[in-house]
Amino acid sequence: MIAELDRRGYALWSSRLDENERGELGRLFTDWPDKRPGQRIDPRRAADLGGVQRLIGALEPIIGLGVRPVRALLFDKQDSANWALPWHQDRTIGVAERRHVTGFGPWTIKQGRLHVAPPIALLERMMTVRFHLDAVDRDNAPLLVVPGSHARGLIAEDAIDDVVRELGQTTCLAEEGTVWLYRTLVLHGSARAAPGRHRRVLQIDLCAGDLPGGLRWSAALGDAAG
């Protein structure tokens, strides 16, 4: 798995969520607000899930001791909240407060939450994981990724289309309980889902260690889309 992640930037976890783990994940989506595409949850809440704990146990030798979720998002792409996501890299992190630390910047506010672009070395250490509650075929907005794009560093926006044409794209289909892992810097996107479908996903960003200079990862709640 680690060889695939290093070479392609994405890999399928050889295990899947079992029935109990899927039930635990499903309860996070209870009483989902109408027309909400996604919402942030406290990463510590995600860390308590059995499936997340089992995955972290498998990844700790790869990412490092103390690896944990530093961001957690729930998505439910459905008729009342359907969207397309253009090609992009995840290049910012959520932090609790603003501090001047060399290499961190520029600063932005996203959905009322403070974000900052960290040094690329930090992004290269991070991993993004998507836990699929629903089956995802080609009509149910599968995530699209560009193999090897994580190794290109920070890709200028006007160069993204050229990189996609050069490297191609992969469609990440899923069954119930499928778990996909991605290097956080990989180029990715998705289309709108077909009518009448649900695409419920828990997405977490993993990192080992604390931020430098007194910066703290944000555990704030709020809306999200992805």
Image (cartoon, rainbow, N blue to C red):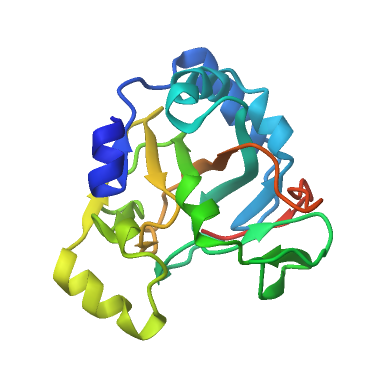
In this rendering, position of residue 155 left or right of residue 115:
left
**Residue 146 or 221: which is nearer the viewer?**
146
Q: Which residue does the image show at 17% across and 64% down from the upper left?
A: 167
Name the residue at 61% across, 62% down: 118
Q: Is residue 156 visible?
A: yes
Q: Position of residue 87 (x, y in %)?
A: 37, 70
Q: Position of residue 136 (x, y in %)?
A: 33, 43
Residue 7 image position (x, y, % from top left)? 23, 45
Location of residue 155 (image quadrant) = bottom left
Q: Residue at x 59, y 63 (%)?
A: 92
Q: Is residue 212 above or below residue 206?
A: below
Q: Which percent across, then down, holds residue 59?
A: 45, 25
Residue found at x 31% / y 44%: 10
Name of the residue lying farthest toward the bottom:
158
User: In terms of image quadrants, where is residue 115?
Assistant: bottom right
> Does the image show residue 35?
no
32 horizontally vs 180: left or right: right
Q: How many numbered marks does the figure carry?
A: 0
182 with respect to 93 (left or right): left
**Residue 134 in the image: above or below residue 24:** below
Task: Say whether residue 180 is left or right of residue 76.
Answer: left
Residue at the outermost front position: 102
79, 207: nearer the viewer: 207
